[in-house]
Image: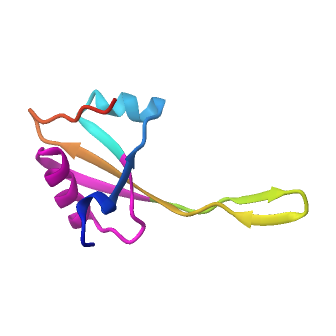
Amino acid sequence: MSNYSDLIKAPIITEKSSDLAKNNTYVFSVDVKANKIQIKQAIEKLFDVKVENVNIINVKPKKKRVGRYTGKTNKVKKAIVKLKEGSSIELN
């Protein structure tokens, strides 16, 4: 990955991720080819925080149908990032 901002696509803001944010844990949508080390470095550089650990979830594509045409949604990789004490990210 050449650029950190290309690696981290967007924060995922849901009810469940909002509850995790209370425990200093944030959820991001990341590039499918990214690994934990690259994600950790990108979060630390972009948001100027210290990362404790990174967990990754690969979300498989779902089958969708419109009329007689079938297809699949895009596959997504989610990163659950836990920050060290004293660090926080403002997601608004």
- Vertically, is 29 above or below 1? above
- Vertically, is 65 above or below 35? above
**Looking at the picture, how far across and down is residue 20, in whole percent?**
34, 33
With 16 as the anchor, is 43 left or right in this view? Answer: left
**Looking at the picture, how far across and down is residue 1, in whole percent?**
27, 72
Q: Is 53 inside the magenta-drawn segment?
A: yes
With 58 as the anchor, is 2 left or right in this view? Answer: left
- Residue sitting farthest toward the right: 68
With 40 as the anchor, is 75 left or right in this view? Answer: right
- Colour convention: rainbow
At a point 36% along the width and 58% down the height, the residue shown is 56
At a point 44% along the width and 33% down the height, the residue shown is 16
At a point 40% along the width and 35% down the height, the residue shown is 17
User: Split into 4 quadrants, where in the image is the C terminus?
Assistant: top left
Q: In which quarter of the image is residue 65?
A: bottom right
Q: How many marks?
A: 0
Q: Give the range drawn in magenta.
A: 28-57
**Looking at the picture, how far across and down is residue 47, in whole percent?**
18, 45
With 79 as the anchor, is 37 left or right in this view? Answer: left
Q: Which of 22 and 6 is in front in this view?
A: 6
**Looking at the picture, how far across and down is residue 58, in whole percent?**
46, 61
Q: Is 52 inside the magenta-drawn segment?
A: yes
At a point 30% along the width and 68% down the height, the residue shown is 35
Q: Quadrant of residue 4?
A: bottom left
- Vertically, is 35 above or below 64? below
